[in-house]
Amino acid sequence: MSCISPDIKSELGLVQVYTGNGKGKTTAALGLAFRAAGRGLEILMIQFLKPPANYGEHISAEKVPNFTILPLGLDHMLSKVPRDIDIKIARETLQRAKEEIYSGKYDLVILDEINVAMDWKLLSPDEVIGMLKGRPKNIEIVLTGRGAPNEIVEYADLVTEMVPVKHPFDKGTGAREGIEY
């Protein structure tokens, strides 16, 4: 059952950024996606640096017909020294993101970990902003990940910085299934 009000899509079109060293950037984007899905909007999350693994969000998205996740990253997290393959994959993922955004099929597109890809110099802020400037009207975009470049922060309509105050990782607690992944 669709819950789309007549004006909902006309109010879309902002660029949101969730960045910072604290936990919760992807989680906040997933919360927004869940809310949008409940209103009948079409959602796409493209994951830049995350491989197709058995993450909880992938399992949940399969149960929501209007929410698609495309994990297009490699099965490793690279160091800050970019390798040719990492740059190639990031650029291919950006091109795929552009194709999906410009298709007009989605109302909300989340580019998960794209800020990290820019911070690690796999993509430039100029190429990301250029892609965003040409997108169809009324598509909400969310960029997640640590290290959002200043150009992205200036371009965005909303920027939220997650700041760590206390985390169980500091006491040696590892990532927990269903909570961190």
Image (tube, rainbow, N blue to C red):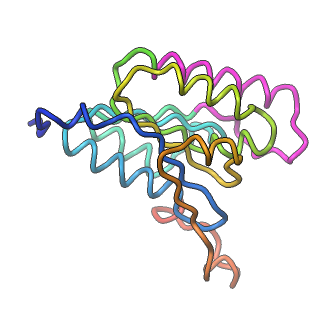
Residue 20 left/right relative to 41 = right
Q: Is residue 98 above or below residue 179?
A: above
Quarter of the image where the N terminus is located: top left
Kindly give the residue lying farthest to the right in the view shown. 81
Horizontally, residue 162 falls left or right of residue 57, namely right
Q: Is residue 53 above or below residue 145?
A: above
Question: Is residue 170 located in the magenta-colored stretch of the structure?
Answer: no
x and y, in percent, of residue 54 in the image: 51, 46
Identified at 70% across, 48% down, the residue is 150
Residue at 47% across / 40% down in the picture?
15
Position in image of residue 145 (x %, y %): 62, 51
Q: Residue lying furthest front in this view?
A: 154
Name the magenta segment's main secondary structure.
helix
Q: Quadrant location of residue 146?
A: bottom right
Relative depth, front residue between 34 and 160: 160
Q: Which residues are magenta?
A: 72-101
Spot occupied by residue 57 in the image (x, y as percentages of width and height)? 43, 48
Q: From the viewer's perspective, is 104 left or right of 90? A: left
Q: Residue at x 53, y 62 (%)?
A: 180
Q: Tell me the quarter of the picture where residue 64 sits.
A: top left
Q: Quadrant of residue 4?
A: top left
Residue 50 horizontal/vertical position (percent): 62, 42
- Queried whether the magenta region covers residue 94, the answer comes back as yes
Residue drawn at 67 percent across, 20 percent down? 92
